[in-house]
């Protein structure tokens, strides 16, 4: 599994536009990207678990920081 171009594009744009208005305009994209990130994180955890049992049972959602509009 590879990091999708959607994820990389969104994060690049977010870096340049880290403000509330941009985020609100792109919230649907964020929701889509968030799902992709959760899937990617789940995959990475399953691969890591092959050599590090300490990640067994870790919820991928708990590994991703949630963006909160009040931070803008």
Image (cartoon, rainbow, N blue to C red):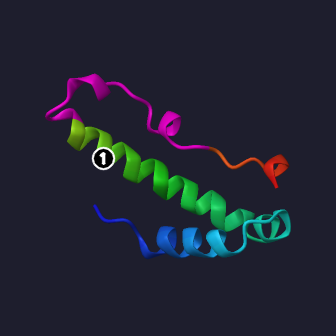
Instruction: Locate residue 16, reporting x and y percent.
Output: 67, 75
Which residue does the image show at 48% across and 38% down from the upper left?
63
Furthest residue toward left: 51
User: In the shown orientation, is residue 61 left or right of residue 18?
Assistant: left
Instruction: Locate residue 8, reporting x and y percent.
Output: 48, 71
Quadrant of residue 57 within the rendered picture:
top left
Quadrant of residue 23 within the rendered picture:
bottom right
Q: Which residue is mark 1?
A: 44
How many marks the image carries: the answer is 1
Instruction: Locate residue 55, reporting x and y percent.
Output: 31, 28
- Crowd tier of the residue under label 1, counting other residues whose Cα lies within 10 Å: few below 14, some 14–19, many 20 or above: few
User: In the shown orientation, is residue 16 left or right of residue 59?
Assistant: right
* Element at label 1: helix
Q: Which residues are magenta?
A: 49-65
Q: Is residue 54 magenta?
A: yes
* Residue 71 vs residue 2, the one in the foreground: 71
Q: Is residue 17 above or below residue 57?
A: below
User: In the shown orientation, is residue 26 left or right of residue 30?
Assistant: right
Which residue does the image show at 79% across and 71% down from the upper left?
22
């Amino acid at each position: 599994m590879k990091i999708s171009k959607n994820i990389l594009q969104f994060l690049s744009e977010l870096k340049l536009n880290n403000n509330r208005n941009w985020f609100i305009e792109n919230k649907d994209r964020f929701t889509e990207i968030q799902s992709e990130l959760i899937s990617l994180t789940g995959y990475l955890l399953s691969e890591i678990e092959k050599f590090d049992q300490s990640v067994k049972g870790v919820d991928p959602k708990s590994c991703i920081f949630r963006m909160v509009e009040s931070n803008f």
